[in-house]
Each structure stands twice: as structure tokens, then as C-alpha cells.
Image (cartoon, grey):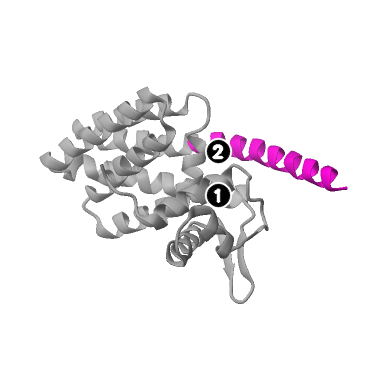
């Protein structure tokens, strides 16, 4: 069992709280209250908030505090489009450059995705999914592409976690993973590229719908709180 660092535990919980609407856009996050909530020291909270700022979920304003960022669908769509191109290129290059051992490890990562999908465990699938994609980046044989893909994936992590909550998304994601692995294993660069690109692009539409639903729920919750306090 891999031990998750305290800062990662706090970050994951805050990611979920933000995408669930528990913390609304523009809301200030009080580090002292977060320390109390998670039962940890100042350092894990600080590191978690810094990680969330790199993802774009929060903004840390000097001498003002940390605030939840407003989600912009157009900006996120642009990032997903770029991620799709990076994923496609990485898969195409990996189809001709991946070594036998990394290919076997990619197959094991796929099996992990299968296991969590069968359990209906979205969080487990999220981590197995990140490992799966990271192996493709690391096998593409292009260091700069590898670096950029990992960076953009970190930026989009909380949003990709959210889209896994769409009905039947894990099952369809798993089928797309299998198609990617088959193409890479066969050395079919064109199919690997197209399949990997489409795997990301399909998430844009689903994510947009989820965010719209999330926004409606968040606004309804805010109206309820306002009415109750009046």
C-alpha cells in the first residue's frame, strides 16, 4: 500500500470540496480552520494550497489570503484541447519507441484501471488513470513533450477527477484505454494518436455539462443559505 503524503490528502479533500461546491468561487479559505478541520500542522495545509494554486483552483493573494478561483469554461476547454494534442502526440511516438518492459507496465496499469472500474471506485480509478497516462508520456522518447504533458495534466487533475463522476464514464474511459494500448502494442502510430486525442476531447463536452450542473447546484445552495439567513 502506497502511503499518501499528508499534504496530498489535504489537497485531495479540498479538490473534492471545491468541485462539489462546498467552497464557492471567490470564497476565502482560512488556513487555521483547515488545520483544525484536517487535524494537521501548518505545513501540509500550506503545501496543499500551493498545489491547488498551480492547478488554478485557488488564488493566493499576498497579505489578503487564499480564495477559490472562478471556473471559466472557455479557458478550460482551451486547456483540454491542448492536452488532447499532447496526449495524441505522446501516444503516436510511444507506439514506435516504447520498450518491452514499459509496455508490460502499461498493461499492468490498464489492469489496475479495470479493477477500480469493476469496484465502482472513482477515486481509485483516478489515480490508476493518472499512472496509465504518465507511462505513455514517459515512453514517448521526447523529453520536452514529456515535461509539458505532465505539467498540463497536473493543472487539469481536479477537473479530470470531476468528469469521472459522469454516468458510465469510467466504463467508457476503460474501453478507450484498451484501444490506446492495443494501438501502441501494434505499433500503429496513427490509430494511437487519434484514439488518445479523442479520449481527451470527449471529456470536454462531458466536463462542460458537469460544470453547468455543478454551477446550478452551487447557485441553488447559495440562494438557500441567503434565504435561511434573511
Closer to us: 167 or 180: 167
- Image vertical order of residue 120 relative to residue 201, above or below: above
Residue 183 magenta-drawn?
A: no
**Label disc, if present, on residue 76 of the rendered structure:** 1
Q: Is residue 16 left or right of residue 1?
A: right
Residue 76 percent across, percent down from the top left: 55, 49
How far across and down, in percent of the image, does residue 195 sit? 36, 33
Badge 2 vs badge 1, beta-carbon distance below 8 Å: yes
- Residue 58 image offset from top left, x and y in percent: 57, 59
Please provide the residue range marked out in magenta.
203-230
Q: Residue furthest left?
A: 100
Residue 175: give x, y in percent of width and height: 36, 25
Given residues 111 and 199, the one toward you in this image is 111
Check the image and report above or below for 47 versus 4. below
Q: Residue furthest bottom?
A: 63
- Disc 2 is placed on an element classified as helix
**Predominant secondary structure in magenta?**
helix
Residue count near mark 2 (Cα–Cα under 10 Å), binned few <14, some 14–19, many ≥20? many
Task: Give the labeled residue for mark 2.
Answer: 207
Vertically, is 163 above or below 62? above
Amino acid at each position: 500500500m502506497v502511503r499518501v503524503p499528508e499534504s496530498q490528502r489535504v489537497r485531495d479533500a479540498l479538490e473534492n470540496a471545491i468541485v462539489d461546491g462546498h467552497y464557492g468561487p471567490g470564497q476565502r479559505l482560512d488556513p487555521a480552520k483547515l488545520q483544525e478541520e484536517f487535524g494537521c500542522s501548518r505545513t501540509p495545509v500550506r503545501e496543499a494550497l500551493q498545489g491547488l494554486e498551480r492547478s488554478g483552483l485557488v488564488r493566493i493573494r499576498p497579505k489578503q489570503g487564499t480564495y477559490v478561483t472562478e471556473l471559466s469554461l472557455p479557458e478550460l476547454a482551451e486547456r483540454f484541447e491542448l492536452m488532447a494534442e499532447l496526449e495524441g502526440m505522446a501516444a503516436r511516438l510511444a507506439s514506435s519507441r516504447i520498450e518491452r518492459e514499459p509496455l508490460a507496465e502499461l498493461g499492468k496499469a490498464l489492469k489496475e484501471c479495470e479493477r477500480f472500474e469493476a469496484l465502482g471506485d472513482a477515486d481509485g480509478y483516478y489515480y490508476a488513470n493518472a499512472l496509465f497516462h504518465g507511462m505513455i508520456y514517459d515512453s514517448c522518447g521526447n523529453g520536452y513533450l514529456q515535461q509539458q504533458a505532465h505539467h498540463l495534466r497536473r493543472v487539469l487533475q481536479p477537473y479530470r477527477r470531476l468528469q469521472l463522476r459522469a454516468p458510465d464514464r469510467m466504463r467508457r474511459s476503460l474501453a478507450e484505454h484498451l484501444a490506446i494500448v492495443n494501438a501502441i502494442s501494434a505499433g500503429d502510430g496513427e490509430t494511437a494518436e487519434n484514439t488518445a486525442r479523442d479520449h481527451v476531447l470527449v471529456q470536454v463536452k462531458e466536463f462542460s455539462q458537469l460544470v453547468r450542473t455543478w454551477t446550478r447546484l452551487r447557485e441553488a445552495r447559495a440562494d438557500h443559505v441567503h434565504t435561511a439567513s434573511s
